[in-house]
Image: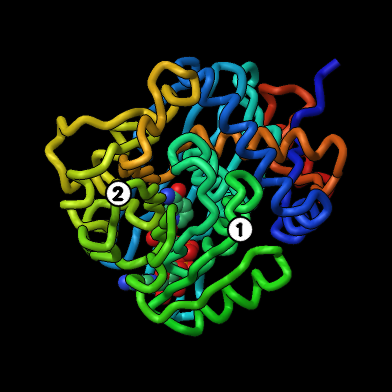
Amino acid sequence: MKPSLNIVPFVSVDNMMRLVLQIGPEQVMRDIAGYIEADFRRWENFDKTPRVASHSEVGVIELMPTSDGEMYGFKYVNGHPSNTKAGLQTVTAFGLLAEVETGYPVLLTEMTILTALRTAAMSALAAKHLAPKGAKTMAMIGNGAQSEFQALAFKAICGITHVRLYDIDPEATAKCARNLAGSGLTLTSCTSSEQAMEGAEIVTTCTADKQYATILTDNMVGSGIHINAVGGDCPGKTELHRDILLRSQIFVEYPPQTRIEGEIQQLAPDHPVTEFWQVITGQVPGRTDARQITLFDSVGFAIEDFSALRYVHDQLKAHPYSEPLDMIADPDDPRDLYGMLLRAKAKG
Ligand code: NAD
């Protein structure tokens, strides 16, 4: 008998929120970090390609595909820093998981919330290996849509207890502080990035601006700090002064993509970087001494989305927060697609 693969589970924004609230955002990010870690351990099994980007004056639209030979996943994502002025989000996304054997999709899901969760999980996973031991304080520069997820992931995965917030827009900082009140984090709202950096052992930069910005200058970065640079993720869109990069041990996701999109687009194409998956597998060390400046030059890579899609797909077994989507045509005779149309016409 023909397997019924034509109905695809769809996770709407509402259902994603239900799922995340049921499990708890911090637990979800711990879990996704575990899925990413497991997939990075088998890095060599994956098809890898820099994401396919379509740039415009105001932003970028990207497709991020990968496969491990059994499952195939992709994410559609945009980045439009000026969107917030029109009441729209900078980043929105949706994605799909399919089985390779038939090519049939097994999941279609919103990924705007899921991207925030996976990005924060990835950042905290990197920091677990790269940040100074026992780090408790993080500066969080850029207090937009991603920021609370970042703060909570660093609490859940790295044991951060204190977050120092700064945004050029004080309303964003106030929103972030309000949303994190009651999270168990001690919060300090700051009026400059210099102030936010005071006493911080980790700094996360998560701003959105379509230019070579200088969120951190060289003099703001003391020895021993870990930098989690999230916002620089497109050609011509960076956050760190080049001199900081020259003093840092740089860790990246997938070099062919990061060299185009990350902070290291400011460096020579052969500047040495470490692939973070090799830290996960133990092939190369993470942080090696207390005075080292470590930089995770995050741009977001397809395997992280694949891990997040796998996680959601697995969760649906216990938490059925999806709706059936009639997405794949299913003629009785697979070669009689036109006949299916004729029969529908006859039924009226
Ligand atoms: P957002 O627009 O919601 O928030 C960005 C915030 O940065 C805003 O509050 C803005 O006021 C602030 N900002 C802009 N310039 C600043 C400056 N000079 N100093 C301090 N604050 C400044 O965007 P978001 O969804 O939070 O995304 C933040 C960034 O992260 C974007 O650039 C996005 O492309 C990037 N991102 C990266 C990944 C990844 O995997 N690396 C994933 C998702 C988003």
Q: Position of residue 300 (x, y in %)?
A: 44, 44
All told, the count of numbered labels is 2
Mark 2: is the Cβ under 8 angstroms from ligand 1?
no
The residue lying toward the viewer, choosing from 107 and 42, is 42
Q: Quadrant of ligand 1?
A: bottom left
For the question of whether residue 79 can be seen, the reply is no
Q: Residue lying at the far left in this picture: please name it.
A: 268
Residue drawn 35% across the image and 46% down it: 224
Q: Position of residue 200 (x, y in %)?
A: 43, 59
Q: Residue lying at the far bottom in this picture: please name it.
A: 171
Considering only order in the chain, which callout, 1 or 2, is on the residue closer to the N terminus?
Answer: 1
Classify residue 133 as left or right of residue 266: right
| Numbered mark located on residue 223 in the image | 2
Q: CA distance from mark 2 to mark 1?
A: 21 Å
Q: Residues within 10 Å of mark 1 (few under 14, many from 20)?
A: some
Classify residue 228 as left or right of residue 104: left
Residue drawn 86% across the image and 43% down it: 319
| Mark 2 element type | loop
Q: Residues within 10 Å of mark 2 (few under 14, many from 20)?
A: few
